[in-house]
Image (tube, rainbow, N blue to C red):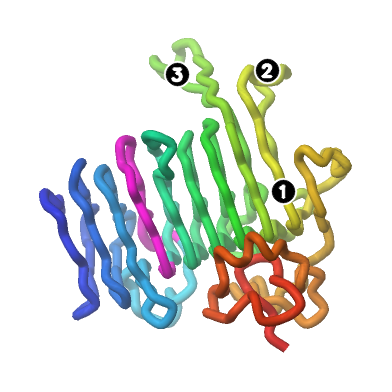
Amino acid sequence: QILYSNTVFTADKPYLIIDSLWVLPGVELSIDPGAHIHLHNNTLVHVAGSLKVNGLPDDPVIFEGDRLEMFYRDKAGQWGGIWLRAGSRDNHINWAEIKNGILGVVVDTFSVVGMPTLKIENTKIINMSYTALYARGAIVEAGNCLFANVAYYPVALTLGGRYRFYHCTIANYWGQYINRKGPALFLNNYYEYQLEPPDGPWYLETRDLEEAYFANCIIYGTRSNELEVDNIYNGQPVDAQMNYKFDNTILRVDTGFDLNDETRFVNLLTENPKFIDPKKNDFQLDTLSPAKDFGLYNIAISFPVDLNNVSRLDDDGPDLGAYERVE
């Protein structure tokens, strides 16, 4: 199906997309609170225009597969994903649940005049057979989001770009039919490609990772190192910026990083955040979690409620990640 003009999906009845949906350049697809979108096997939502997902705390917008049997309720790989194509702009996803697909959200586009290509807030992307959020040279702002339990990368920020994450839980305790194949967070500033496969020469394209900033976040999982910084090509550093910083964040890393480098790591914790039941997608904090009250207040005031619509501002301090512990 192709959308040639501005379209609104309402919550009156569920939507079933059998073949891929295309939102053409200059066209806006707006989705009302409580709308339920079912997508068939391998189906993608291609957005060359703009996507506005307007969920509410009690009426999130849900994207999932079209198999309704209990067996499929938490099975990954049932549909393709949401693909923001090159030229897409002004995309906003708020209070959504995106689950059981392959790609989650792909941001394969550049911004204009410094505006984000995607602003995503109060959203869960879980149970994906590849990635939850995959960006290529984009500008993304994410706040109060859960990216979790995928086969490869919950968050992959590739080919440079600019990114800011606040009060996000990026975690991987994947335990489905194939083993994990990547860290929770992947950062990259180059791309290798071939114009004449399989025997033609390989070319290298580099782009600056101008910023990858994480504040009041939790980045954790079952691996000893959940951060990969990929800026080495043929044994040499890539000639492009690789700027990243973690501020008041829990990050599971090994000895390959200098955690005393305050240009990259400020008030970092490496302890287990003590999620309640992460293998079952319960990333709320247990009572002894080191994430409790460790967040920066000046960040939390922009995200005053968590994914359960619980205030972050009513106790001794905001908790890290997307969930506030309630005693």
**Which residue corresponds to the image point at 74% horizontal and 60% vertical from the top-left?**
222
Please give the residue where the numbered disc 3 appears in the rendered image. 194
Position of residue 42 measured from the top left corner of the image (x, y, whole percent): 33, 54
Q: Is residue 10 above or below residue 260?
A: below
Position of residue 311 measured from the top left corner of the image (x, y, whole percent): 59, 79
Lower sequence index among marks 1 and 3: 3
Lower sequence index among marks 2 and 3: 3
Quarter-wise, where is residue 158 in the image? top right
Q: Which of 259 and 114 is in front in this view?
A: 114
Q: What residue type is labelled 1?
A: Phe
Quarter-wise, where is residue 113 in the image? top left
> Looking at the image, which residue sits at the far bottom?
327
Q: Nearer the viewer, residue 52 or 46?
A: 52
Between the C-alphas of marks 2 and 3, the distance is 16 Å
Q: What residue type is labelled 3?
A: Gln
Report the mark closest to the observer, 1 or 2: 1
Q: Nearer the viewer, residue 153 or 271?
A: 271
Position of residue 237 measured from the top left corner of the image (x, y, whole percent): 70, 20
> Looking at the image, which residue sits at the far left?
4
Element carrying mark 3: strand
Count the marks: how many?
3
| Magenta-colored stretch includes residue 90 | yes
Numbered label attached to residue 246 = 1
Please give the residue where the numbered disc 2 appears in the rendered image. 234
Q: Residues within 10 Å of mark 2 (few under 14, many from 20)?
A: few
Numbered label attached to residue 301 = none
What segment is highlighted magenta in the picture? 77-97
